[in-house]
Amino acid sequence: MEKSIFKLQCPLPKFDFDIITLAHGSGGLLTNKLLENGVFNLLKNDELDKHHDGALLNFAGDTVAFSTDSFVISPVFFPGGDIGELAINGTVNDVAMCGGIPQYLSLSFILEEGLPIKDFWDILVSIKYAADRAGVKIVTGDTKVVDKGKGDKIFVNTTGIGKLHSRANIDIKNIKKGDKIIVSDNIATHGIAILSVREGLEFETTIESDTRSLNHITTALLDKFGEDIHLFRDPTRGGVASTLNEIATDRDLGIVLQDEKIPVDEQVEAACEILGLDPLYSANEGVFMAIVSKDIADEMVAYLRKFKEASHASIIGEFIDDHNGKVLITNPLGGKRVVHMPIGEQLPRIC
Amino acid sequence: MKYLSEYRDPKLAKKVLKEIKKTVTKPWKIMEICGGQTHSLVKNGILNVLPDKITMLHGPGCPVCVTPLNLIDKAIFLSEMNNVILCSFGDMLRVPGSKKSLLEAKAGGADVRILYSPLEAIKLAEKNPDKEVVFFAVGFETTAPTNALSVMHAEKLGIKNYSILTSHVLVPPAITALMEDPESKIDGFLAAGHVCSIMGYWEYFPLVSKYKIPIVITGFEPLDILQGILMVIKQLEKGRAEVENQYTRMVKEKGNTSAQDIIRKVFDTGDQIWRGIGNIENSGFKLNDDYSYFDADKKFSIAIEKVIENQECIAGDIMKGLKKPLDCVHFGKACTPQNPLGAPMVSSEGACAAYYNFSTMFNKIN
């Protein structure tokens, strides 16, 4: 009874679409619309309103970072990793991006009838290794099986929790004019590695996904630079472009990027060129962005480059108090363009 | 060998830009034919740095944009047939038909696959003998050889469950149509480098002598485009009208003759409707009688309603170089990449989408 009254009070919000399409899961504009008009609007509360990769929760003085993620990748085994490794690293990284030190994870499977047990085992083994590398324990979970054809081999959900680093003060509000944007390593590698093995798009390459946990690096950065780090974000779906657009809008500042400073592996760049894709919109799994005070940016890049996983760290741009809410990119020729929020997943072009 | 950074070298590009500025004395209107070039012009901010005397007009060279609406409806109809796997290049999926796009058909349960090459579609047909695999064969001369090759492969392998839905458009007849248009204000062309890598540029000699207009075969990187513009300007300033080749690393006068042989074996030229422009004589490739078995349009009885294009869209005037995207009252308001009124707003290489996505002019940023 109560439920039906609740329904009456919550009419369907006005969406521009009648059904869910894949674009709603791409991390771009349509994902945002679905979340803003639907989820955030209906469920709003102080923690959710931050729109970060995870939430910071207060338990009698102790602050805890909490995040969850679902993994539905196809193919489940891809160059450089598999869905299991991705599921651990993804959630570990989301907790780390909040300034947390990930400690415990839950792990849930939705398995499709017919999945070879060997595949399941291989995924489980990489889950174990990824958890060991990240230094997290898997402490609870769930397993469901759906009819053949009702899933795609295996879906994984992980939820992570960990104490906030004592020097972390990660909040989008802390970002100010002049702050620098650092990416930790070459971008777009994961997205292109996955695309290179998609049915119908296969191309010969040695590009491997860079999926990895980043918590050890973010912890080291917080130890050293503390409050000068204003934000961490990992630009997964929708890539660097989507994440920066979100931040520029939420913080109401402008962003200027320098094209020549954005690190992209040569092979990845070539693949993007052939397929007509923009590395800025391609997914990343082993890269994070740090938004930091301008005074420490150079020192942080030098420090980051000592880590194998961040050897291409680079300052790619900065926040300015102009064209607020928008992201602009300049090139050495003197040309500039707007980096828009993508609408949906990038689609390879004709020629 | 690296093959990208050299053609994006800012020092060299600045040098060419300086020479352009030195050379140009009169106002000139240059049309880049290819959507890839439009994209590169806007994405690299070249429009911002060119001298005011040079106006770039954005031509009809985006295959997605000029594919007729009824053909998109046909592809959607086919994709919604029970036993059909509809394969397409990625950028066709978001183009709205009269009621929906292929992407929406897919969300509704249609089996739509994104492929990079039609030869992959042949593999799919082999793997799914109980299904009909249809490839949505769209493009300029550039994609014609692989589309033709897929049909030849299917014939050779005895694959009966493969067919193509074609909308192939050709550049030289489009240039003719643009020049015959009494409203045309085009002074020179950058011809599409990739089309010429297949077809060569022998087809352009009669055009330059008839219309007294320079045509420069041009590549796609910033340096290519700036060089192409410089070559056109030099001709215009001297009163010359010749075919010149900027894209020598890819294009030979005769083109790729084996690719042309493959095209000729499978396709005949015929009249073709260009979305936003209308019918252009002999401007398309159609499967010839020997291969008509592979023509999806003939193989299936496709029942679609006749629809009239949205009259509000000025796509035709934009592709003829008569108007700019920003001249349209609907640009960025009623018409956006999420809700496009016309095709140039859909494809990433369409002029309107390029302006919408990248242009600082539209986004009011200095």
Image: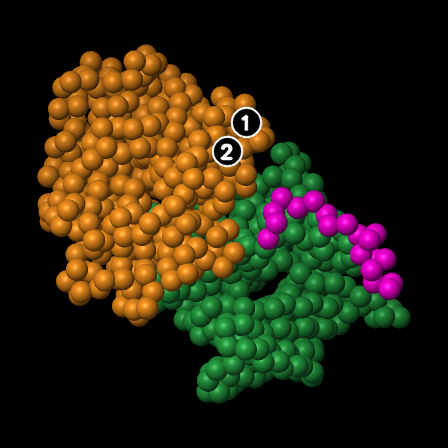
Which of the pair B51/B191 is nearer the observer? B191
Q: Kindly identify the residue that appears in the image at 39 percent across and 45 percent down.
A: B303
Chain ID, green in image: A
Which residues are drawn in magenta?
Answer: A1-19
Chain to which the residue tagged by mark 2 belongs: B
Q: Which residue is mark 1?
A: B330
**What is the drawing colour of chain B?**
orange
Relative height, residue B284 to residue A186 (above, below)? above
Badge 2 amino acid: Leu
**Left-right relation of B335 to A335:** right
Mark 1 residue element: loop
Q: Kindly identify the residue that appears in the image at 85 percent across and 70 percent down.
A: A59
Mark 2 residue element: loop
Contact between marks 1 and 2 (CB within 8 A): the answer is yes
Which of the pair B351/B273 is nearer the observer? B273
Where is residue B98? Give x, y as percent: 47, 39
Chain to which the residue tagged by mark 1 belongs: B
Q: Which residue is mark 2?
A: B341
